[in-house]
């Protein structure tokens, strides 16, 4: 039997269906959406299936019925399908560096469509051309138009660290997207997708009929792969290959996929969703790797966290309102909305009483990716972060805390000199570095461990040892050990059979490394 081909390099529905790629049937969602004439917005992280969704909707409205044989929508909508003209714009795939780059992309899209419908009267602005295009297509075909805009926010999200250029693009997009409201009588269906939603300063301020389904229970599984879908026949061969390559049984292969790539939730229903990009790549290669994070590391996110003086350890387990997660206007002081919308945090639970979501890292891949990248940015003079972390882990696993501290001290010597002079303004700088290292070690780590007498800076548990660690920035290791003793930080572990080490560390901002160490 021929092995299935997983779509790791295409998101075109027609290609996937005609060339026998594995396709996870989402056409029941498509059927639900297209029966509701209107305007819809869906926000999902990058590489999460948004482009494939719009490509599927395009094929549906264009009446490519043969592509849908055997799928859910084929049963749900028997008989003839009415066709409509489709205007499909993709705002990604462009490097946005100059004022004119957005106009250049819009001109390319509009010129192609104008040529298709014989439009020779070119208006000056993209807004006027877009409106004229919709009007003309309606007159020529006698049908209302379907408008699909993929990655609507790329010009804005790609320039989020260039406020002046972003504002220029925001004004241009505001005018362009406002056409959708003006042309409402000629539009049968409209859908926009993107990663981010720009809240109070939205480019959609004039589009008051846009229905945001990003948090909808009904559409929680519209992109990505659910548990049921992963266990379908389409993925059996890939899971067997993964198991065989790694010496696992199929149950262990499924467990590894779940730990590394599952854990996304997009609504109060808490439906589990796997990252489709990582799943398809893992089954294509037959190995577990950090595919999604490796495809584009979030350097901007790390710099934002650094500049905002945000407590990194609080990311996992914070409680927020839904409205907070939708508003990027505060990202420089509160990076949580940016981290959520870009997929580095997800919903973990919902409390109906307080109407608050608890957020956290979705899975191991994302946690390793974001913490590793944060560490790389904070330690921008150090190249081998993973190697250094592995060495520290080895010493802790052996019960050699002094050796581990020595490796940590050597690692910290890589802090660039420019940060050694400016680091005083980053209140949590050293705690962040230490937290990231401890988390990446892969051991049982708690930061700000709560006891009856206070919070322990950090505890690390291996199979054989427990470490209670207190850090003093611009302080002394003796002060750290004294605090461990006076507040009885070791007491919660008194009944544990594993040997316990009390580790006091004194950090010097001047030297940007560990100055004093006491281990008991």
Image (cartoon, helix red, strand yellow):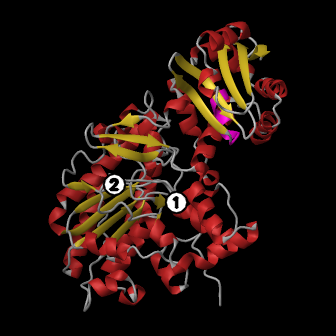
Task: Name the image quarter holding residue 84.
Answer: bottom left
Work out whether residue 429 can be spotted. no
Q: Residue 202 in the image: state x and y as whole percent.
A: 30, 43
Give the residue at x 64% y 52%: 294
- The mark nearer the N terminus, 2 or 1, is 2
- CA separation, marks 2 and 1? 16 Å
Residue numbers of the magenta segment: 434-442
Q: Which residue is mark 1?
A: 275
Q: Quadrant of the C terminus?
A: top right
Percent x, y of residue 100 = 45, 48
Quarter location, residue 28:
bottom left
Residue 167 position by quadrant: top left
- Say which residue appears at 58% left-offset and 29% top-offset: 447
Q: Is residue 379 left or right of residue 350?
A: right
Callout 2 crowding tier (Cα within 10 Å): few <14, some 14–19, many ≥20: many
What element does badge 2 sit on?
Answer: loop
Whether residue 153 appears in magenta in the rendering, the answer is: no
Residue sitting nearer the eye, 125 or 222: 222
State the quadrant of the N terminus: bottom right
Q: Which mark is residue 380?
A: none
Vertical side of 406 occupied by 480: above or below: above
Q: Residue 192 appears at what percent x and percent y?
A: 34, 59
Q: Which mark is residue 214?
A: 2
Residue displayed at 36% across by 60% down? 220
Left or right of 21 on screen, residue 31? left
Main SS, magenta residues: helix
What residue is rendered at 43% in x and 46% in y?
348
Does the image show residue 157? yes
Which SS class for mark 1? loop
């Amino acid at each position: 039997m021929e092995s299935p081909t997983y779509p790791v390099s295409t998101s075109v529905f027609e290609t996937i269906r005609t060339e026998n790629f594995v396709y996870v049937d989402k056409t029941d969602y498509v059927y639900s959406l297209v029966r509701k004439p209107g305007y819809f917005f869906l926000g999902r992280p990058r590489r999460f299936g948004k482009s494939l969704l719009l490509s599927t909707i395009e094929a549906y409205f264009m009446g490519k019925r043969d592509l849908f044989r055997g799928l859910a929508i084929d049963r749900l909508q028997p008989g003839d399908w009415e066709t409509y003209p489709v205007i499909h714009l993709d705002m990604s795939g462009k490097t946005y560096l100059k004022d004119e780059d957005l106009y250049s992309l819009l001109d390319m899209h509009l010129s192609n469509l104008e040529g298709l419908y014989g439009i020779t009267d070119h208006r000056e602005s993209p807004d006027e051309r877009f409106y004229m295009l919709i009007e003309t297509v309606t007159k020529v075909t006698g049908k209302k138009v379907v408008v699909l805009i993929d990655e609507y926010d790329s010009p804005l999200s790609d320039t989020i660290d260039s406020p002046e250029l972003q504002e220029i693009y925001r004004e241009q997009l505001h005018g362009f997207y406002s056409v959708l409201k003006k042309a409402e009588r000629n539009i049968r269906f409209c859908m926009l997708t993107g990663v981010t939603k720009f809240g109070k300063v939205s480019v959609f301020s004039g589009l008051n009929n846009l229905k945001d389904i990003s948090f909808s229970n009904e559409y929680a599984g519209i992109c990505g792969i659910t548990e049921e879908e992963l266990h379908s026949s389409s993925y059996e061969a890939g899971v067997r290959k993964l198991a065989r390559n790694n010496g696992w049984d199929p149950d262990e292969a499924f467990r590894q996929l779940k730990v590394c790539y599952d854990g996304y939730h997009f609504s109060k229903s808490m439906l589990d969703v796997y990252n489709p990009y990582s799943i398809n790549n893992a089954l294509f290669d037959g190995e577990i790797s950090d595919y999604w994070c490796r495809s584009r590391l979030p350097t901007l996110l790390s710099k934002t966290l650094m500049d905002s003086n945000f407590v990194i350890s609080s990311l996992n387990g914070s409680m927020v309102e839904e409205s907070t997660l939708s508003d990027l206007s505060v990202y420089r002081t509160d990076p949580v909305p940016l981290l959520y919308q870009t997929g580095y945090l997800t919903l973990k639970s919902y409390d109906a009483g307080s109407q608050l979501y608890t957020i956290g890292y979705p899975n191991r891949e994302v946690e390793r990716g974001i913490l590793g990248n944060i560490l790389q940015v904070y330690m921008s003079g150090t190249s081998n972060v993973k190697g250094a972390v592995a060495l520290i882990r080895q010493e802790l696993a052996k019960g050699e805390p002094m050796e581990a501290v020595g490796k940590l001290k050597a690692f910290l010597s890589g802090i660039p000199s420019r940060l050694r002079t400016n680091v005083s303004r980053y209140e949590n700088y050293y705690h962040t570095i230490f937290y990231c290292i401890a988390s990446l070690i892969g051991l049982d780590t708690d930061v700000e461990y709560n006891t009856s007498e206070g919070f322990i800076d950090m505890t690390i548990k291996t199979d054989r040892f427990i470490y209670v660690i207190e850090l003093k920035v611009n302080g002394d290791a003796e002060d750290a050990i004294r605090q461990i003793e006076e507040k009885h930080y070791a007491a919660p572990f008194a009944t544990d059979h594993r040997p316990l080490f009390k580790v006091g560390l004194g950090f010097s901002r001047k030297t940007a490394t560990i100055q004093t160490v006491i281990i008991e």
